[in-house]
Amino acid sequence: MSTFVVSNHENCRMEINKLEPTSVWGNFSKLNAVPRPSKKEEEVIAFMLEFGSKLGLETFSDEAGNVIIRKPATEGMEGKKMITLQSHLDMVHQKNADTEFDFNTQGIEMFVEGDWVKAKGTTLGADNGMGVAAIMSLLESNYIPHPPLEALFTIDEETGMTGAFALKEGVLKGEILLNLDTEEDDEIDIGCAGGIDVTATRTYNEKEGTHGDAGFQITVKGLTGGHSGMDIHRGRGNANKIMNRLLYLGLDHNVRVSFLNGGSLRNAIPRESVCKLNIVRKQADSFLKKVKELSNVIIQELKEQEPNLIIEVEDIKPAKRVMGLGAQEKMVKAIYAAQNGVYAMSGAIDDLVETSNNIAKVKVEDGKITIGCLTRSSVNSAKLDLANSLRSAFELSGFDVEFSGDYPGWNPNPNSEILTVVKDTYVSLFKDEPRVVACHAGLECGILGQNYPEMDMVSFGPTILGAHSPDERVSITSVQKFWSLLLEVLKRTN
């Protein structure tokens, strides 16, 4: 079996390498062979340092692990401004429950389906691997005209943007920054939301399970998930919120939770949740009937957004240790009260989510409850207001609440010179107007702008759908479009 998988993976890589532009897809394939989950980027940092050194280019990493590679201008373009090309090395590690895969040791297994490149049961890493691959192709090219280039490959973008935060003033020399981390090929991004992690924790006293209890496991699965910024407005189901609705029924039936695990990453809408519980046997039938009724209601509510939603109930051996009823009731009511999804739309930009929250992780085990949220907003005061609302809901239920990972948004500059260049280039190439937008995701531009306030910045990229989920895919024709735009922009900068 293992031999078959390896062989199949190699065939997939060969198929990917034949796509146009071959240099970009070839580098993406090489990059995806290197494990690179957030906070475990040692291998990909070494890979990138070796890549730059073999090209004979100035290559180094800073104390955080960000990699910087500089390449002189091609002949005739020496007098132009240096351009910093920026993408992040890490990727979100999400997989389907039935997929056996170790992100720490394995490379991504890719395949082509129509106009899309996808991964087998895992995230693809096109976010932001396509940007990294494009920069690699520019650095190794002997024929593409360009001004002086500075490549900035940051680390840990997906779980705190710590690489961008750690980049010190004076390291970069570029005057223009092209961030290649946008996920719609007709968009030019000039602003983004900031974010803050909200973590609620509390302990509880474990109680002995009652002799004669019945045991059940409830599983919520089959949800679409997705990016907790870019997809938060799409009305997709949140596995933690769905599970909590079911547990709320248990408050009247003396249901006792022994284990709960939902979601995994703060920036991914949770797709699955599993709960193990005990119940007095004589109340089991009544509870299970209500669970079935509510499950059908929830599935009907979400039938358009979540056609593959499944809620399963299975008999299991009752647990020996369970939560006390008081702590359980407070947890369930706190999660019910906590905001999830879109909180406010922007009053300044049409159809832009201003403020949102993702109840990303809920875990109950061994006497401890942990609830992790990611709160986003393009308005800093609104971000803190919603974070304080969450704090209040959790503290009223006896939780300790910690704020961490606070990062700023990126304020739009509609008068940017590089924005004009990219817009005019887009129109010239594609005979259509691009959409100039701000996004609800987090881009590193706002953080980098703190130490480099004079740097002129925009963001663009190919079309990537389903980022932060195993449904992630990137459009092949869109990569061609993105590559053409990038090459022409480099020619037209001052």
Image: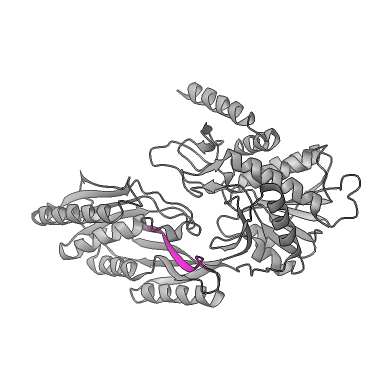
Q: Is residue 361 left or right of residue 333?
A: right
Q: Estimate the x, y position of residue 9 in percent, counting from the top left.
A: 54, 28
In the displayed structure, 347 sits above or below 214; it is below
In the displayed structure, 313 sits above or below 1; it is below
Q: Estimate the x, y position of residue 384 in percent, counting from the top left.
A: 51, 75
Q: Estimate the x, y position of residue 443 in percent, counting from the top left.
A: 61, 60
Q: Is residue 324 left or right of residue 282?
A: right
Total residue callouts: 0
Q: Is residue 194 left or right of residue 2?
A: right
Q: Which residue is at the front of the view, 160 or 83? A: 83
Q: Quadrant of residue 262?
A: bottom left
Q: Is residue 215 left or right of residue 398?
A: left
Report the magenta residues as a range. Answer: 350-362
Task: Please identify the residue farthest to the left as the structure is shown.
Answer: 282
Q: For the N terminus, which image quadrant?
A: top left
Q: Which residue is at the front of the view, 388 or 477? A: 477
**Which residue occupies 38% across, 38% down?**
98
In the displayed structure, 218 sits above or below 358; it is above
Q: Estimate the x, y position of residue 15 in percent, counting from the top left.
A: 59, 27
Task: Please identify the residue farthest to the front as the structure is shown.
Answer: 431
Main secondary-structure element of the magenta-colored stretch: strand
**Which residue occupies 84% across, 50% down?**
147
